[in-house]
Amino acid sequence: MKGPWDLAPHTAAKHKIYGKYLDAWFPILIQRYGEVTYAEGFSGCGIYSHGEEGSPIIALSRLLRRRREFSQLQRARFLLVEKERHNAELLAGELGKILNVGAPVFDFDDGVVEVRLRCGECQHELPKLLNQSKVWSKPILAIFDTFGGGVPAQLLANIATNKSSEVIYTVLPQHFARFHSDHARGDAIFGDTAWRDVAQHEPYKKREHIAREFETTMRTAGFNHVLRFNLGTSRGDQLNLLYGTCSDKGVEKFKDALWNADPVQGAGFQDPRDPWQQMLPMHHEPDLAPLERLLHGLLLNAPNRSQTVEQLREFTKLHTIYKASHVTRCLTKLEKDKLIQTPTGALRLGTTTITARPPKPEQLSMLG
């Protein structure tokens, strides 16, 4: 589809999160390795209808803005693919502006910053660029804003061979729910045939089934930690965003980006584990009600209805959209509501054992 397009609220929210995360990712990787590779397989045209920046421009501008700070930077590669020729030409023009070269850019290299833009299918052109740049063994941040499509599971697995590489993947699960008869394409994207069971699910369960299959695909590819959440709008539009990494620190930094991103009017996100599927507005002071429900449910189903504070923090960090630092506030609220039992004043100690109390009838509606 030819751009530029109007910037949807959930896309604007996604870009805010990307920008915050890149502000952390660039300095960490440069300090550790001296080089970074940013790869994007569905790059768009670099600009939206009212002049807003697209994700490749956001990434490159974040690096260029702080280039002088990165004394250890030896190489920064931006490898970009866009299927539509019209969009690729628009993106080349935007790249030329930000690089200040006065002409569209498909290939640029000043000895440190390298930009390569190719027109074609992601699954064919991006591996070629990664091969030519010889970066498979180096840390890569790959962005796949596929919306209604996907990328082959094998491409994810190839990227995951380097344990410092990461992937951010946005999808529309309902696409595969509608077009589930395209078995060959789906099998290549998911890496197996389990996704086909979507045809057997009730309509309201199809989207979640596909979203879980995407998460499984990323874990199978080799990413130890996969965060999944829904980006939505007040109109009901929804994207699934998945972040795959092998780094505990990466998880922490991505959640920092999620919770510190500037709010976008009309956009919010959901934790897919929340039984209420509550839409949370983008705000620096999070609504912790979904996490309270999740933690209480986890405790009720645990042996002896108990876990340590550290176990609850680890669960929160790796399996929800919330940060481990949110746990103490939730436990304080649950204790106040007499839904947990805990030693007095010991909520901040990781070894403290927390025990759930069954909710009273009047509390059931609060917990979902």
Image: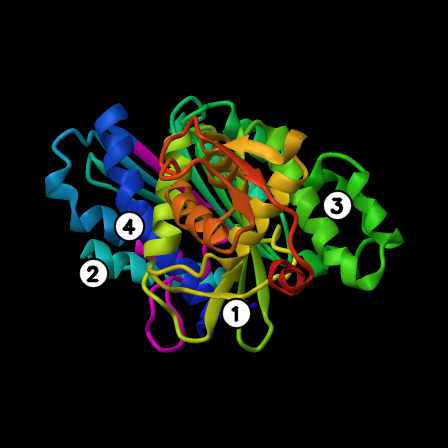
Residue 22 percent location from the top left of the image: 31, 46
How crowded pointer 2 is (Cα within 10 Å; few <14, some 14-19, many 20+) is rated as: few
Q: Earlier in the sequence, mark 4 or mark 1?
A: 1
Which numbered disc, 3 or 2, marks the residue closer to the eye? 3
Q: Which mark is residue 186?
A: 3
State the separation of the CA atoms marked 3 and 2: 42 Å
Q: Which residue is mark 1?
A: 2
Residue 168 in the magenta stretch? The answer is no
**Secondary structure category for the residue under label 2:** loop
Report the front residue among 137 and 255: 255
State the separation of the CA atoms marked 2 and 1: 24 Å
Circles 4, 1 touching at the beta carbon (< 8 Å): no
Residue 148 percent location from the top left of the image: 64, 58
Left or right of 309 on screen, residue 189: right
How crowded pointer 4 is (Cα within 10 Å; few <14, some 14-19, many 20+) is rated as: many
How crowded pointer 3 is (Cα within 10 Å; few <14, some 14-19, many 20+) is rated as: many
State the separation of the CA atoms marked 3 and 4: 32 Å
> Please, what is the three-letter code of the amino acid marked with disc 1?
Lys
> Please, what is the three-letter code of the amino acid marked with disc 4?
Leu
State the separation of the CA atoms marked 3 and 1: 25 Å
Q: Earlier in the sequence, mark 3 or mark 1?
A: 1
Report the front residue among 254 and 89: 254
Left or right of 240 on screen, residue 136: left
Q: Which residue is mark 4?
A: 60
Magenta-tinted stretch: 36-59
- Total label count? 4
Which numbered disc, 3 or 1, marks the residue closer to the eye? 3
